[in-house]
Image (cartoon, rainbow, N blue to C red):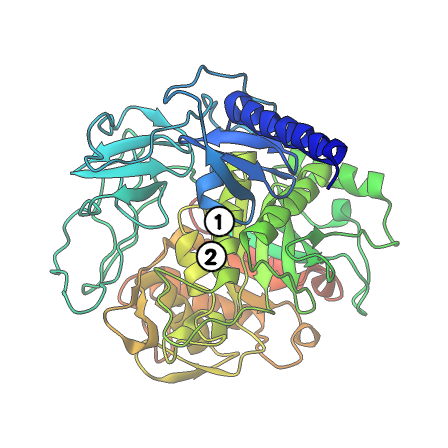
Amino acid sequence: MTQRTLMRRTRIAAIIGGLMLAASVSAATWQEGSTYAAGTVVDYNGKTYSALVTHTAYAGANWNPASTPTLWKETGTSNSTATPAPTATPVPTAVPTPHDNAPTQPPATATPAPTATPISGVSAWSSSAVYTGGQRVSYNGAVYEAKWWTQNNAPGADQWGPWKLVSGTAATPTPTAVPTPTSVPTASPIPTVSPVPTATPVVTATPTPAPTATPCASNCPTLPKHAVVGYWHNFENGSGVIRIKDVPDEYDIINVSFVEGDPWTKGKATFVLDKAFNEAEFIADIKEKQAKGKIVQVSLGGANGTIVIDSPAAREVFIQSLGDIVAKYGFNGVDIDIENNLSIAAGEDFRNPTTPQVVNLVAGVKALKKRFGPGFTLTMAPETAYVQGGFGVSGGIWGGYLGIIHGLRDELNLLHVQHYNSGGITGKDDKTYTQGTVDFQVAMTDMLLTGFNVGRDPNKFFPPLRPDQVGIGLPSIPAAAPSGGYMNNAEVQKALDCLMKLQNCGSYKPAAAQPDLRGVMTWSINWDKTNGYNFAKGHKAYLNTYPK
């Protein structure tokens, strides 16, 4: 090696060392809500991190450098002080829509890493304080970190709640009548949410006789008390095409079908308007329906729609791409109709799911709700095997949706399971009921209204949903469900009579009437048109007989 070469290498090493030192000194503090380009260096909790990929740290997603190794790489120890000077919060890339009325959030601040005595220097949780993602509090001898914006939600109540346990032992939720066994996990109660000021708080649902669901207390739906839901085709399948503006007003919720997954990019949601429609007219039609008080959502999935969200990176892509579709067309929210790529492990606990597709879908939808605010609507239309099928056996597709429903029950406006193309399903009374009958509709719906033991395990009790969160999904004509399940309006309304008034029941009779049951869903609006919209007109007239 020549002296000139040695000197050149020494100078290069000095320059690189200087750059690394400068980066350690001048790196900006990581901020939730900011967009970071690949290679960006930030400070977080006394360490420096380099961004591996370009991404947005969405508020509420809790994608800080320490918890997202797929997004950040630790590069060293920060020379910044424990309380760095505040920096201006970069403008998030998400563009607000007319529905984006989330509470204004103060910028998140970096908090010190827990020490051997984590309570020291950590403020006590306050029911009146507003917390944003990354802030830490002490509560009942433990330290918790906020996952997203929250107020008056006590830490430790539920794993899907706004708080993550950092150190110590989780706070004990509100006591229930049933003592907690020590050998196996007990069924988690529904998380207690902040009550409406005039409402009296009630005990959350527990696996005790005749349980009831927690009344809606925050982010309550703006749907009509009783609704008719229909799916609109963004394609021609023999049922004909129809513009959104021509959908009859009997439909309260219109689910545009479908957003699908990009086969080349994991997590990427795609929506291509069929060539039969003009995009400007389509957007105008949506606005026209919304001006009439209707909800127009986009549905994710369908029989052919597969989307893979198997990692935090894919989840990032999912949140960005689906959110951009919602913003572009002005949709009110999202319907989840995933019918592919969803298989859980045998006996997987719906309260603590491990399947990446389930975990990332739940987190992704929560982030979308955070982006668009309380007006963002969420419905689901799983097949019976994915929901009620989880009573008889848990694993594979059986019960595959339960972790999604449970994880999003506070965000969920309406669940309308597909009561068709399913064959026979076992009810909670251990009797098998055949699709296309009054007993099938009543037994399957009653399982959601009263809860059931997943895999027949009393320690895995799926808590009931509120009646206003539940509807019945049916085909509008026989051709819409080739594998069966069609019922004429008169028979459907017998089932509704039984559920809502305890009248006209068959062999299965619920323990209590549920007059607040939300209503009915159909596949599809297009098929209904071929029969003069008999489904929508007949059932809307029926539901209008109930108090509004």
According to the picture, the residue beneath numbered tag 1 turns out to be 363
**Residue type, mark 1 in image:** Ala
> Observer-nearest residue: 415 or 301?
301
> Residue, x 22% and y 63% (percent of image)?
186
Residue at the (65%, 75%) spot, across then down = 481
Q: Is residue 248 above or below residue 330?
A: below
- Badge 1 crowding class, 10 Å Cα cut-off, few under 14, some 14 to 19, many 20 or more, is many
**Above or below — where is 165 with respect to 122?**
below
List x then y, in percent, for residue 526. Answer: 74, 61
Going 19% across and 65% down the picture, which residue do you hit? 209
User: How many numbered callouts?
Assistant: 2
Q: Quadrant of residue 293?
A: top right
The residue type indicated by label 2 comes to Val
Can residue 252 be seen in the rendering of this structure?
Answer: no
Q: CA distance from mark 1 to mark 2?
A: 6 Å
Q: Secondary structure at mark 1?
A: helix
Which quarter of the figure is the C terminus placed in? top left
412 over 64 or under it: above or below: below
Residue 12 found in image quarter: top right
Q: Nearer the viewer, residue 163 or 104?
A: 163
Locate residue 499 relative to residue 121 in the image: left or right: right
Q: Position of residue 143 (x, y in %)?
A: 25, 37
Residue 295 at what x, y percent from top left? 61, 43
Residue drawn at the location 29% of the way across and 77% of the way down: 456
Mark 2, residues whose alpha carbon is within 10 Å: few (<14), some, or many (≥20)? many
For this rendering, which residue is in front, 543 or 375?
Answer: 375
Describe residue 399's horizontal placement relative to residue 252 as left or right.
Answer: left
Residue matched to label 2:
359
Q: Verify CB contact (< 8 Å) between mark 1 and mark 2.
A: yes
